[in-house]
Image (spheres, grey):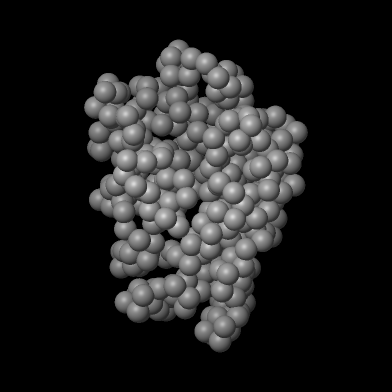
């Protein structure tokens, strides 16, 4: 994509109400060099459309060098995300027989190099169903334990994708496909084993499964996602399908937000910790003790208020008002609670981007 195409995509995402996004790219050395990725990040952060602004750009690109990770860190990325796909070495090599991704060790040690390059928020994940899920579940937890033991910082996020339909991919051909009941057990066990991490579930899963995952401890979900190149501006023709995978939850972002609000959840677009320097070991200390709630509750309420004012349908705005009223008294720090009430009024008057 050109920088102008990226600009149009970002404006479309901002008009939906998004404040952070995940930039994903392939590993072609000529079409996706690190210089191109850095230019994309600069473009994304530069776009201010109406009340919209992307406040955090997370990155999912192929394993690279310490030097390149330093460049990404200096560019101001949020979380660096890279999925192992499978920790089973033999199966990994069968699935990646050649190309830069074929080096199992280089791929698996990418997070070590990212940490060495200054990126202290990293996101792990495997593609459940490629190999025996029990093996990959243990491998994922051992990877988290390794990072914490070596760098004092475990994964900022853990994603739990599983095999789903895509162009030329039929999940039925994978003998290790994970059924719903086992998948939910995996989600629950990861939450128990790594309680400090953010757990992500994508629109690969159906609304029903995503709802169950929220009950099991998932804390981050996507909404209104398109997985095709340039899919937010122009819907792609079916015969020209470039989608990475088919989405099962095709609701708009606002429909997802309304669903969360009506389910008693407090949706948050918060990016405060990243911009305040509460990352890596500083974030982990707050997360493990629960002190992060001092900031999270208030920041979530203020970002929800922004969304309700700028992007929500009337019925969503009404639900948001009820949730904000119910959640305000739960802000644990009195000074922050009182300041939040004042800032909510200022948001109604047109001011934006408050954070603690």
Q: Looking at this view, is 206 or 143 the one in front?
A: 206
Q: Quadrant of residue 326?
A: bottom left
Q: Looking at this view, is 343 or 12 the one in front?
A: 12
Q: Quadrant of residue 299?
A: bottom right
Residue occupying the point 56% across, 53% down:
6
Locate residue 165, reporting x and y percent.
Answer: 30, 36
Vertical arrangement, residue 58 with respect to residue 63, above or below: below
Residue occupying the point 74% across, 39% down:
70
Residue 32 vs residue 130: left or right? Answer: right
Residue 125 vs residue 71: left or right? Answer: left
Locate residue 51, reporting x and y percent.
Answer: 56, 73
Vertical arrangement, residue 147 with respect to residue 249, above or below: above
Tell me if I can see residue 263 in this picture.
Answer: yes
Residue occupying the point 58% across, 69% down:
49
Residue occupying the point 32% across, 29% down:
168
Image quadrant occupied by the C terminus: bottom right
Q: Quadrant of residue 150?
A: top right
Tell me if I can see residue 334 in this picture.
Answer: no
Vertical arrangement, residue 8 with respect to residue 86, above or below: below
Locate residue 238, reporting x and y percent.
Answer: 31, 44
Locate residue 115, reporting x and y percent.
Answer: 68, 36
Residue 347 vs residue 191: left or right? Answer: right
């Amino acid at each position: 994509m050109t920088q102008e195409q990226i600009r149009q995509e970002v404006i479309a995402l901002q008009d939906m109400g998004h404040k952070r996004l995940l930039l994903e790219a392939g590993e072609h050395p000529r079409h996706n060099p690190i210089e191109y990725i850095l230019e994309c990040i600069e473009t994304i952060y530069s776009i201010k459309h109406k009340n919209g602004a992307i406040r955090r750009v997370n990155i999912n690109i192929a394993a690279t060098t310490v030097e390149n990770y330093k460049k990404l860190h200096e560019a101001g990325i949020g979380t660096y995300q890279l999925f192992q796909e499978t920790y089973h070495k033999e199966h990994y090599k069968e699935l990646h027989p050649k190309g830069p991704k074929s080096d199992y060790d280089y791929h698996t040690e990418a997070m070590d190099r990212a940490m060495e390059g200054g990126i202290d928020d990293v996101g792990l994940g495997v593609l459940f169903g490629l190999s025996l899920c029990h093996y990959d579940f243990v491998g994922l937890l051992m990877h988290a334990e390794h990072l914490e033991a070596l760098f004092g910082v475990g994964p900022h996020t853990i994603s739990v994708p599983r095999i789903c339909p895509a162009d030329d991919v039929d999940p039925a051909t994978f003998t290790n496909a994970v059924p719903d009941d086992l998948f939910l057990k995996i989600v629950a066990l990861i939450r128990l084993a790594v309680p400090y991490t953010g757990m992500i579930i994508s629109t690969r899963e159906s609304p029903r499964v995503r709802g169950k995952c929220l009950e099991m401890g998932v804390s981050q979900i996507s909404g209104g996602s398109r997985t095709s190149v340039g899919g937010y501006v122009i819907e792609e023709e079916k015969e020209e399908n470039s989608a990475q995978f088919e989405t099962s939850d095709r609701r708009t972002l606002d429909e997802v937000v309304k669903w969360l609000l009506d389910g008693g959840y407090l949706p948050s677009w918060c990016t405060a910790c990243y911009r305040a320097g509460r990352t890596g070991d500083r974030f982990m200390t707050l997360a493990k003790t629960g002190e992060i709630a001092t900031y999270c509750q208030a920041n979530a309420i203020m970002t929800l208020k922004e969304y309700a004012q700028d992007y929500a349908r009337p019925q969503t705005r009404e639900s948001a008002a009820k949730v904000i009223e119910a959640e305000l008294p739960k802000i644990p720090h009195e000074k922050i609670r009182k300041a939040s009430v004042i800032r909510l009024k200022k948001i109604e008057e047109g001011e934006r981007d408050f954070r603690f």
